[in-house]
Image (spheres, rainbow, N blue to C red):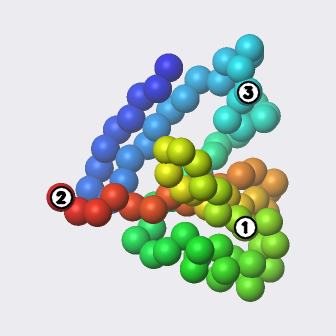
Amino acid sequence: MFAAGEGDHGYVGVHRVYADELPIVARPNAVQLTFSTSESLDDVASRLVDAGHADAAVLREDFGSMLTVTDPDGCGVQVHRAAAPA
C-alpha cells in the first residue's frame, strides 16, 4: 500500500511494512525521512561528513542517485536530488 498527499512544499507517503519483505524501517512505529535538495548530493554528503556524520554516502543506482545517512536515533534518512521545475 502506498498513499501520498501533496502540498506546496513536499508530500507525505505512507507505506505498509509487509512481514515477507525487507521493511523500509526495521522496527515497528518507526518513521523514515526522505528529503529533496537542489544542491549536489556529493556536496551535501561532504558537509554531513565534515559535521561528524561519517556514514553519509551517495548511492548511485539505475533509477537515480540518493544520499543516505543515519540520524541520531539510528534511523536511515534519504536525500534525493529535486526534480527540475517544469
Q: What residue did someone put label 3 on?
A: 22
Which structural element holds mark 1?
A: loop
- Mark 3 is surrounded, within 10 Å at the Cα level, by few (under 14), some (14 to 19) or many (20 or more) other residues, namely few
| Residue 25 or residue 42, whichever sits in front | 42
| Residue 42 or residue 18, whichever sits in front | 42
Query: With respect to residue 28, does 78 lie above or below?
Result: below
Residue at the far bottom: name it: 50
Query: With respect to residue 43, does 1 lie above or below?
Result: above
Q: What residue is at 54 percent from the left and 56 percent from the top?
A: 65
User: Residue 86 shows which numbered tag?
Assistant: 2
Which structural element holds mark 2?
A: loop
What amino acid is found at the position of numbered circle 2 in the picture?
A: Ala
Quadrant in the picture for residue 24: top right
What amino acid is found at the position of numbered circle 1 in the picture?
A: Ala
| Residue 28 or residue 45, whichever sits in front | 45
Q: What residue is at 23 percent from the left and 62 percent from the top?
A: 85
Q: Earlier in the sequence, mark 3 or mark 2?
A: 3
Query: With respect to residue 32, does 60 lie above or below?
Result: below
Quadrant in the picture for residue 67: bottom right
What amino acid is found at the position of numbered circle 3 in the picture?
A: Leu
Q: Is residue 9 left or right of residue 32?
A: left
Q: Is residue 29 left or right of residue 7?
A: right
User: Residue 56 shows which numbered tag?
Assistant: 1
Q: What residue is at 36 percent from the left and 54 percent from the top?
A: 10
